[in-house]
Image (spheres, rainbow, N blue to C red):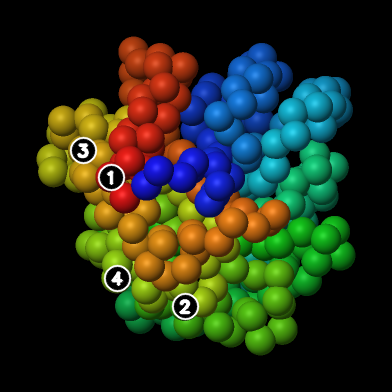
Amino acid sequence: MKDSIHDYMKVGIIHFMIYPETMKGEGPILETLEKICKDDFFSAIEISWMKDAEVRKKAKELLEQSHLTVAYGAQPTLLVNKYNVNSLDQAERKKVVEFLKERINEASELGAKAVAILSGADPGPEKREEAKKALVESLVELSNYAQTKNLNFVLETFDRDIDKKALIGPSDEAVKIAKEVRKTCKNFGLMVDLSHMPLLNETPKQSLTAVKDYLVHIHMGNCIMKDKAMTGYGDQHPRFGISTGENGVKELTEFLKCLFDIGYLGKKTDNLPIVSFEVKPLPGENSEVLIANSKRVLREAWSNL
């Protein structure tokens, strides 16, 4: 592909993954956020909770200066607290919904355009359908609330059997959930991640073809699943091309081709879709080096199209 990557997508990066010391809503949020804001390779950034009101104020100022499109990932807030948005305990589920409404408020305060979550734990085959109904109920309430803030609301698919063990889950089941929510909530959509596809035993073609009518957001990443004893095993988003991993230039090239095939990419518009890196340093690795790794892999994959 000779055209610029930036003609077809807003290349983004997930702040709280490349700088995992900020994942709990604390730590060097502003210092690390500033590094991304200064990097003009990126057109989008995904942030998460910031517990300190003063930090949020300064972060908003940085983001406003940057001209970055901002999205808000509430996934770590659910994982850290072990919250289940499809809990079969109504009181617990309602508590999580109220918690997420606070995250939507925070996303609005920070100038985000969308909020993303993951489903809660898979309860097993016997209670799975009941949990899906609970998930739909939560998603409808949250999407409606997000709409009052002029925000989109997004569900990301995760593995069911290996690491996060989430209800959603396989792409075909995600589509059924999305279809139900979209009946009343036009601001709802799905997100898929290249790093989750091996964990779901799905190919990019299988996953993207299934979800294309509801797809609103993309992540690019890697995973390790050959051996449970390997550092970074499961859904830990190691760097592209790591010898123990599943995804490198070849796999990212195939993924991008599929995004063109389904029409997610391909139009030069004023409202380009977001495609974000989700990469996390393993122990001893350097965040800035992994950012450079990701850019190099994307450029090489793009040149192969």
For the question of whether residue 43 can be seen, the reply is yes
Marks 3/2: CA–CA distance: 28 Å
Front position in the image: 97 or 116: 116
> Going by the image, does 104 lie left or right of 83?
right
Q: Amino acid at mark 1?
A: Asn
Q: Pointer 1: what residue?
A: 304
Left/right placement of residue 229 relative to residue 56 reads left
Residue visible at 49% across and 54% down in the picture: 218
Q: Say whether residue 14 is visible.
A: no
Q: Amino acid at mark 2?
A: Val
Among the two numbered marks 4 and 3 on one chain, the one whose residue lies closer to the N terminus: 4
Q: Within 10 Å of the Cα at label 3, are there few (<14), some (14-19), or many (20+) other Cα atoms?
A: many
Cβ atoms at labels 1 and 3 below 8 Å apart: no
Q: CA distance from mark 2 to mark 4?
A: 12 Å
N-terminal of the two: label 4 or label 1? Answer: 4
Question: Are dots 3 and 2 in contact, CB under 8 Å?
Answer: no
Residues tagged 4 and 3 counted as in contact (Cβ below 8 A): no
Q: Amino acid at mark 4?
A: Gln
Check disc 3 and report its element: helix, strand or loop.
loop
In terms of secondary structure, where does tag 4 sit?
Answer: helix
Residue where numbered disc 4 is placed: 206
For marks 4 and 3, give the one nearer the viewer.
Answer: 4
Task: Out of 23 and 204, give the one closest to the viewer.
Answer: 204
Residue under label 2: 175
Q: Residues within 10 Å of mark 2 (few under 14, many from 20)?
A: many
